[in-house]
Amino acid sequence: MDKDELFEARRRFRNNIPGLFHGSYRKKYDKAMSGKSIRSAIDIKCLECMCWRQAEVKKCNIVSCPLWPYRPYK
């Protein structure tokens, strides 16, 4: 994948993130993608997995997921 394709894939993903909580999910995604926050990367992956619903992340029972011990909103 060349740089343009990578940029476009990231742009499409970011545009599909719900604009909930004054865009905080998009800000968290930007922080994760900048390489400045592993915590933000984990948070975004968990939220994406649970269809962007914090309440579902709290109830996550996928204990085989390698991110489960680090999930947000426990």
Image (cartoon, rainbow, N blue to C red):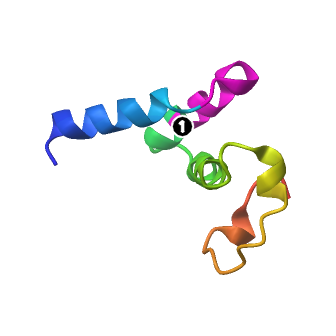
Which quadrant of the figure has residue 72?
bottom right
Q: Residue sitting at 79 percent across and 53 percent down?
A: 56
- Give the x, y percent position of residue 20: 71, 26
Amino acid found under the numbered disc labelled 1 = Tyr
- Give the x, y percent position of residue 8: 28, 32
Q: Which of 56 and 70 is in front in this view?
A: 56
- Give the x, y percent position of residue 39: 63, 51
Q: Residue sitting at 52 percent across and 43 percent down?
A: 32
- In the picture shown, does residue 21 fall above or below 60? above
The extreme left residue here reads 2
Q: In this view, does 25 lie to the left or right of 69?
A: left
Q: Residue sitting at 47 percent across and 32 percent down?
A: 14
Q: Is residue 59 magenta?
A: no
The extreme front residue here reads 51
- In the picture shown, does residue 42 fall above or below 21? below
Q: Is residue 18 left or right of residue 5?
A: right
- Magenta-highlighted residues: 18-29
